[in-house]
Image: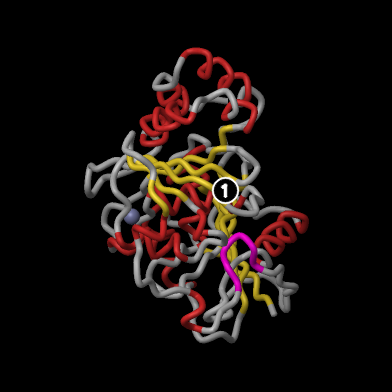
């Protein structure tokens, strides 16, 4: 296993932590997660020192502005995030570092997050994205080594889920129970796609997605040339635009594990059909440019 980005990024950490990180990820790809056992050894004042490590995972061909973020989950584990941009695509396809970190914790089955650290002040888009998170009232946000602040101070008079009559929140969303209603269709480029078990794993993630405003529950799995799978979930937002698409959710995780966006050979979307929105064409646009990939689709209902 060779993860050059991780190996370079780790050099930003204090030496004892470097050794533990190498040990923790010697047998499996880096997940973007810093185990709670390692986080527990860091003093609160040392946590911003993880941000240069996180920023190494940014891909910024448009802005050349690398952002690194870290969230601490309720379990005590840390989750990094970094911004992703796509040359030749709309800016709306971008992933912000705070979104990436929160997505990372959410995919790891955290029940919520306690702290957010970031190396630049969170933009309005991210503040709105965070507004959707369960327990955001108690979340603290710290920019570099400045004093931390309650999240509510960063987004006064906010518009949130309750304004649309939604009592759910990201991280504490109910599990859905949609099933495939048809055979998968679409022709993947290259080798045949994964096993029925892999399909079931993708469908299971779709059932953990968060789409309380549109009902468009879905997930998207990416398979690399060396048979690793990364499955992203859709997380929707009351203000719509800060929603994080499932493809971006998966690409962010792929990046932590050291894969380039061109390492993907197969993409599988599991989505609920017959809803007011459909993101298939948006995903095809990015996948076609990234790697001339076609999209296999599993219809759910
Ligand atoms: Zn942002």
At x 44%, y 67%, the residue is 243
The answer to whether mark 1 is within 8 Å of ligand 1 is no
Nearer to the camera, 259 or 7: 7
**283 w.r.t. 35: above or below:** below
Farthest right residue in view: 197
Q: Is residue 170 magenta?
A: yes
Q: Report the residue marked by disc 1.
A: 105
Left or right of 36 in this view: 61: left
Coordinates of residue 63 in the picture (x, y in percent): 22, 47
Q: Main secondary structure of the magenta part?
A: loop
Left or right of 214 in this view: 199: right
**301 w.r.t. 289: above or below:** below
Report ligand 1 position as a quadrant: bottom left
Farthest left residue in view: 63
**298 w.r.t. 84: above or below:** below
Coordinates of residue 254 in the picture (x, y in percent): 51, 44
Coordinates of residue 26 in the picture (x, y in percent): 62, 22
* Screen quadrant of the C terminus: bottom right
Write down the region rendered in magenta.
Answer: 168-173
**39 w.r.t. 228: above or below:** above
At x 56%, y 41%, the residue is 225
Nearer to the camera, 57 or 159: 159
């Amino acid at each position: 296993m060779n993860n050059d980005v991780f190996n370079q990024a780790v050099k930003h950490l204090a030496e004892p932590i470097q050794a533990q990180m190498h040990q923790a990820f010697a047998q499996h790809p880096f997940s973007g997660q810093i185990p709670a056992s390692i986080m527990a050894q860091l003093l609160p004042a040392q946590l911003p020192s993880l941000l240069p490590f996180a920023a190494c995972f940014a891909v910024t061909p448009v802005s050349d502005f690398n952002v690194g973020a870290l969230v601490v989950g309720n379990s005590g584990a840390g989750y990094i995030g970094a911004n992703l941009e796509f040359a030749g695509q709309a800016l709306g396809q971008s992933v912000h570092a705070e979104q990436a970190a929160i997505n990372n914790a959410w995919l790891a089955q955290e029940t919520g997050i306690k702290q957010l650290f970031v190396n630049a002040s969170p933009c309005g888009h991210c503040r709105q994205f965070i507004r959707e998170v369960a327990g955001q009232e108690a979340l603290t946000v710290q920019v570099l080594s400045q004093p931390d602040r309650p999240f509510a101070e960063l987004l006064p008079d906010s518009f949130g889920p309750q304004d649309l009559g939604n009592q759910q929140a990201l991280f504490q969303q109910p599990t859905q129970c949609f099933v495939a209603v048809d055979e998968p269709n679409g022709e993947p480029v290259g080798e045949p796609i994964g096993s029925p078990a892999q399909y079931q794993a993708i469908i299971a993630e779709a059932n953990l997605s968060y789409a309380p405003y549109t009902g468009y529950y879905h997930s998207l799995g990416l398979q690399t040339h060396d048979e690793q799978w990364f499955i992203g979930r859709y997380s929707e937002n009351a203000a719509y635009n800060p929603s994080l698409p499932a493809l971006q959710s998966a690409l962010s995780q792929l990046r932590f594990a050291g894969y380039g966006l061109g390492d993907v050979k197969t993409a599988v979307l599991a989505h609920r059909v017959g809803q007011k929105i459909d993101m298939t064409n948006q995903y095809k646009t990015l996948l076609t440019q990234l790697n001339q990939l076609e999209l296999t689709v599993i219809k759910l209902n």
